[in-house]
Image (cartoon, rainbow, N blue to C red):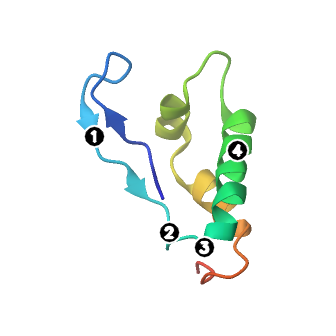
Amino acid sequence: MTLGGSDGSNHAPAAVAGKVIGPSFAADEITDAIEAIIETYQAQRQAGEKFVDTVKRVGLEPFKAAANAIRRSTAKAA
């Protein structure tokens, strides 16, 4: 899973690859990982702030920690 990338559209003019936030998630973990990332965004964002802007402001660590916390069957991140 990667976060913080952009496609070069009007919202983020420069195309940038996202950063990998950890080892792969099992199929039964991915929905929970995405939910944890969205909840982290909702808790960290400022009024009217886009997801990518929140990631740039707070960094990847809060999102990585939230996603890794839901791991059940894949390797736990150190």
User: Most extreme residue toward the front, as rendered?
Assistant: 27
Answer above or below: position of 47 versus 64. above
Query: What is the quadrant of residue 40 in the picture?
Result: top right
Specify the amino acid type for callout 4.
Thr
Lower sequence index among marks 4 and 3 = 3
**Residue at 58% over, 59% down:** 64
Q: Are marks 2 and 1 in contact (CB under 8 Å)?
A: no
Label 1 SS: strand
Dot 3: within a 10 Å radius of its alpha carbon, few (fewer than 14), some, or many (20 or more) residues? some
Q: Quadrant of the C terminus?
A: bottom right
User: Are there few (<14), some (14-19), or many (20+) residues within 10 Å of tag 4?
Assistant: some
Which amino acid is tagged 2?
Gly
- The residue that appears at 52% across and 51% down in the rendered structure is 60
**Near-viewer residue (73 or 51):** 73
Disc 3 to disc 2, C-alpha distance:
12 Å
Q: Nearer the viewer, mark 4 or mark 3?
A: 3
* Labels 4 and 2: the sequence-earlier one: 2
Q: Which mark is residue 40?
A: 4
Separation of residues labelled 1 and 4 (CA atoms):
22 Å
Q: Element under label 4?
A: helix
Name the amino acid type tagged 3: Ala
| Residue 8 located left or right of residue 62 | left
Q: Which residue is mark 1?
A: 16
Amino acid on which disc 1 is placed: Val
Q: Residue at x 61, y 68 (%)?
A: 27
Residue at (64% x, 51% y) in the render = 34
Question: What residue sits right under mark 3 in the picture?
Answer: 26
Q: Which residue is mark 2?
A: 22
